[in-house]
């Protein structure tokens, strides 16, 4: 493994568009540095410099935009706050077994991208936003491998959708815009409640206040997962695989809300605790 130091890029101002989206703090690195490290053999991971070497190692997937690897800093900060050592995985890595050999846990992060419907046996029938195949291919492979090995895995927003697809499920390609499910306000504030069940209710309570930054959602979660949370308009907001040590997907972003409880549960699962 060759670690690459990730740079912290502080957010400033707001992004364009009709929704209130503050530009977040991000960890970034040049993809050319990733390619150079991979050409020397071994894995190229980004090191945000959080946590300690004795903490459980948590792989966090990242995005690739305009030649830069990037991820909202809140993911790595939440992992470190929960007691883990975050490592950031750039898109395009093919040595999935090597990654999982290093991992005590995996976080499939969200981002401004869609999973192409061909991955769940459908054609494009509605709005399809940015597709990053290098990322989707890696995330689906990491999900399959983590589920097969029993490695704790948390899917956030698009990461939950990836878990559902790997579990044999399908997605709603575009949620109705009237009334809107996606919040137009700052996603560091809640938008709607989610009613929870099972282990999620044990960790978070029967109802959690969630944010909402997605236009796609899980339609069917597949036979291995079960629905563990819904919004008032019946959108699936959480899924769990009961037979797995920790395989959880949530459609909202707890790290943006400053809520580390699911990340704490993820780290606890690496230590054999629930």
Image (tube, rainbow, N blue to C red):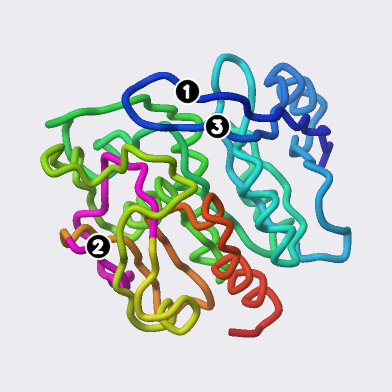
Q: Earlier in the sequence, mark 3 or mark 1?
A: 1
Specify whether 3 is left or right of 180: right
Specify whether 51 is left or right of 117: right
Q: Mark 2 and mark 3: span between their CA atoms?
A: 27 Å
Q: Earlier in the sequence, mark 2 or mark 3?
A: 3
Q: Which residue is mark 1?
A: 15
Q: Is residue 151 above or below residue 128?
A: below
Label 2, secondary structure: give it.
Answer: loop
Label 3: few (<14), some (14–19) or many (≥20) C-alpha neighbours in 10 Å: many
Q: Is residue 226 magenta?
A: yes
Quadrant of the rendered image containing residue 179: top left
Specify whether 158 is left or right of 38: left
Specify whether 172 is left or right of 53: left
The magenta stretch spans which residues?
210-232
The structure residue drawn at horizontal position 35% and vertical position 50%, both measured from the top left corner, is 161
Q: Which one is closest to the eye, mark 2 or mark 3?
A: 2
Q: Which one is closest to the eye, mark 3 or mark 1?
A: 1
Q: Mark 3 and mark 1: span between their CA atoms?
A: 17 Å
Q: Which residue is mark 2?
A: 231
Q: Which residue is mark 3?
A: 63
Q: Are marks 3 and 1 in contact (CB under 8 Å)?
A: no
Label 1, secondary structure: give it.
Answer: loop
Q: Which one is closest to the eye, mark 2 or mark 1?
A: 1
The structure residue drawn at horizontal position 60% and vertical position 64%, both measured from the top left corner, is 260
């Amino acid at each position: 493994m060759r670690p690459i130091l990730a740079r912290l890029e502080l957010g400033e101002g707001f992004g364009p568009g009709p929704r209130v989206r503050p530009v977040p703090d991000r960890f970034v690195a040049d993809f050319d540095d990733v390619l150079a490290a991979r050409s020397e053999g071994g894995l190229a991971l980004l090191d945000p410099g959080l946590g300690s070497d004795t903490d459980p190692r948590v792989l966090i997937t990242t995005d690739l935009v305009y030649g830069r690897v990037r991820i909202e800093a809140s993911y790595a900060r939440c992992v470190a706050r929960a007691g883990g050592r975050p490592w950031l995985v750039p898109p395009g890595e093919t040595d999935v077994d090597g990654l999982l050999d290093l991992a005590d846990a995996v976080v499939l992060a969200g981002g401004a991208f869609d999973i192409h419907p061909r991955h769940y046996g459908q054609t494009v029938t509605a709005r399809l936003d940015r597709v990053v195949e290098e990322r989707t291919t890696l995330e689906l492979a990491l999900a399959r491998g983590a589920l097969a090995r029993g490695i704790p895995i948390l899917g956030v927003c698009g990461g939950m959708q990836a878990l559902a697809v790997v579990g044999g499920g399908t997605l709603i390609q575009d949620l109705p815009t009237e009334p809107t499910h996606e919040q137009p306000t700052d996603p560091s504030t809640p938008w709607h409640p989610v009613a929870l069940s099972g282990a999620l209710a044990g960790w978070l309570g029967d109802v959690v206040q969630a944010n909402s930054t997605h236009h796609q959602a899980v339609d069917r979660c597949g036979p291995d997962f079960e629905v563990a949370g819904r919004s008032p308009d019946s959108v699936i907001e959480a899924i769990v695989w009961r037979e797995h040590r920790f395989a959880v997907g949530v459609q909202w972003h707890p790290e943006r809300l400053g809520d580390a409880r699911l990340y704490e549960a993820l780290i606890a699962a690496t230590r054999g605790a629930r």
